[in-house]
Image (cartoon, helix red, strand yellow):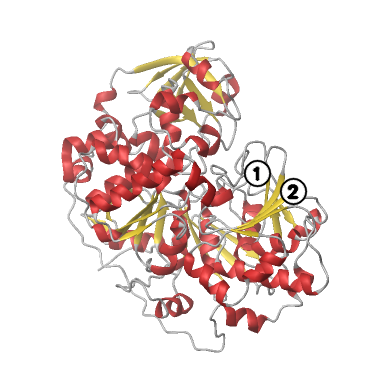
Amino acid sequence: MNRRPMTLTQKILAAHAVGHPRPWVQAGDILRVRVDWTIASELAWNGMDRTYQALGRPRLHDKNRFFLAVDHTVDPETLATDPRAQRLAKLSRDFALESGIKHFYDANQTILHTRFYRDLVQPGEVVLGADSHTSSHGGMGAFAIGLGGADITAAMVLGESWIEVPEAIAIDYAGALPFGIGGKDVILRTLHALGRNTVAMERSVEYRGEVAGFSTDMRFTIANMTAEFGGLNGIFEADGVVAAWLAARDGYQGGLGYYRADDDAPYVERHRIDLARLEPQVAKPFAPDNVVGVAELAGLPIDGVFIGACTTTEEELVLGALVLEAALAGGAKAQAGKRLVVPGDLAIQKRLADAGLWAAYERAGFTIDPPGCSMCLGVASRKAGKGESWLSSQNRNYHNRMGEGSLAYLASGATVAASSLAMKVTDPRPLFAAIDPARFDRLLGRDRAARLPEVRVIEPEVAVKPATGRAVHGGATQAGVVLRGRVQRFGDHIDTDAIIPGQFCHLTKLDELGDRCFHFVRPEFPSRARAGRTLVVADEGWGSGSSREQAVWALQGCGIVAVIARSYAFIHKRNLTNEGLPYLVVRDPVFFELTIEDSELAIDLSAGTVLHVASGRTFTAHGATPMILALQSAGGLVSAIQKHGARVFTVLAGE
């Protein structure tokens, strides 16, 4: 069957497409896709339950293919004392009991992405998660993306979703990594070289080149932080390294989709990153691409260190312990400071205990907590104080991410460990020289001399269905709708942590969320919105960061009627559509020069135009896709499902 060249992502989507009219997919195609897995945490389920209730609490499409973990808000102290955390945990437990799902993990057993990656995800699968770091599972060769809770609830119930096939870029890594340099250093270097929300924005990122030496843990970390890169998904081709991991896995073993991008795959850009002389990397506040080599910050005093969160793998925890052993053996002493280490899963915790590695952390003055997201989100009892500087192996360092007024520096677990004794940023490479690489491999159960399994590369089988010639439904209900208001103006890269801080994501009532909108960075925002400043105008990357749909609810809760920006994070754009909050993409630089704080605008939704009242200038918005228009016409995703039921995507796609 004739077809065009495809990227790795396109091949997986083609294999999962429903009713597609040709045997290939290309960027811009709008697909109905079968979904293999949906995954969520208790913090996401809080909002998902609202959607699930609106849908009438129907039966799940497959109760064995929804994965739910209680991990975001449940450090031991918070779970024991905080009614909010207790309510979130109970809500998830009650749903697990109600639905009979197979994969439910209660508090302090695992981190959502850690257990799912290690035990369940397979190459070639489609995974949708209510968390932006669902991109992690591309490390195993799956198409994995984070979406808002409404999308995940719909996929959980229907077993399918829709996707606009993204453009793709290739990151070609070159050069062998020195011992001790890991996935966190690689992705931080990539962010430094290319910038967040730039070349990866709303695109698939396919990691290629000299990656055969990358462990599955390294691939996890790199794919995980594709969310910080701005990519829709990050993915590696599954190879013998992945096959060896799967062969040793005790968990799920299903059909394997070992796909390969075609040699002439249609990447819109390719970027080469040289790793041969890579030094440990550190991201300075308040952006994960504000990266320098560790030598530039050596000696910088820090108040605390944290090794943990979903991006920190077993490999990093083991190397961190060996770094501490080497430092302590060399006579280093633990100075005063705050130290916390949190494994990603009980299985990892046990493996380190059996190997005696927790002793090194204890001797270095670390508190060891059970699995959970912990300080990465700064919403529970484990958080940084105002004005405190922390070096952390987590993945985000936005304003207030680790706690109100905190300053977060990002690095690998090994760099954090090396810095933890003197409580100063420290280059770990002299300590790497004292570590036996063979012992490191043994502790991780690796045998580099063993022959890797061979994999059978396959091509997607596309269920081709002739096109009906009918157009996608949409647009009609917006005819004649004109929105007027005054502007609250923002710049680039406004993240969802800023729009609604994680501390308030337990709320579900719109007015309560609205009261907390921009709580830390622009506390006057709600009162100004309620006084008539009901339009948001922003530059690039509006809504980047976490997938939380509460960011849209918070805007709605304080009276925002529309958002205009140069570009949007993919997940947030879906959430705006699903929740029925109009948005427009305007790219004319003159519009942004004219539109300042308190400017008056009139938006004609049916025409897709914006009038700048003072100047009389009218600007045309970039056209929305047919599926987005269809969902906007239906009043959002929940309304569309309520109207069309299980055939919702068939109807909206005009099939």
Q: Is residue 29 visible?
A: no
Residues packed near mark 1 inside 10 Å, few (<14), some (14 to 19) or many (20 plus): many
Estimate the x, y position of residue 365 in percent, counting from the top left: 71, 60
Instruction: Please tell me whether mark 2 sits on a helix, a strand or a loop.
Output: loop
Which residue type carries mark 2?
Asp
State how far apart marks 2 and 1 are (Cα): 9 Å
Q: Residue at x 66, y 42 (%)?
A: 286
Which residue type carries mark 1?
Ala
Q: Is residue 226 left or right of residue 629?
A: right
Quadrant the N terminus occupies: bottom left
Task: Out of 464 and 514, give the one closest to the viewer.
Answer: 514
Estimate the x, y position of residue 236 in percent, counting from the top left: 48, 66
Q: Residue at x 72, y 73 (%)?
A: 325
Q: Is residue 587 left or right of residue 329?
A: left
Q: Residue at x 76, y 77 (%)?
A: 434
Task: Out of 246 and 292, give the one closest to the viewer.
Answer: 246
**Whether label 2 touches label 1, CB < 8 Å:** yes
Estimate the x, y position of residue 524 in percent, counting from the top left: 57, 20
User: How many numbered discs sit on the rendered protein?
Assistant: 2
Looking at the image, the residue that sits furthest to the front is 80
Return the residue at label 2.
Answer: 303
Q: Which mark is residue 384?
A: 1
Q: Earlier in the sequence, mark 2 or mark 1?
A: 2
Residues packed near mark 2 inside 10 Å, few (<14), some (14 to 19) or many (20 plus): some
Instruction: Please tell me whether mark 1 sits on a helix, a strand or a loop.
Output: loop
Q: Is residue 557 visible?
A: yes
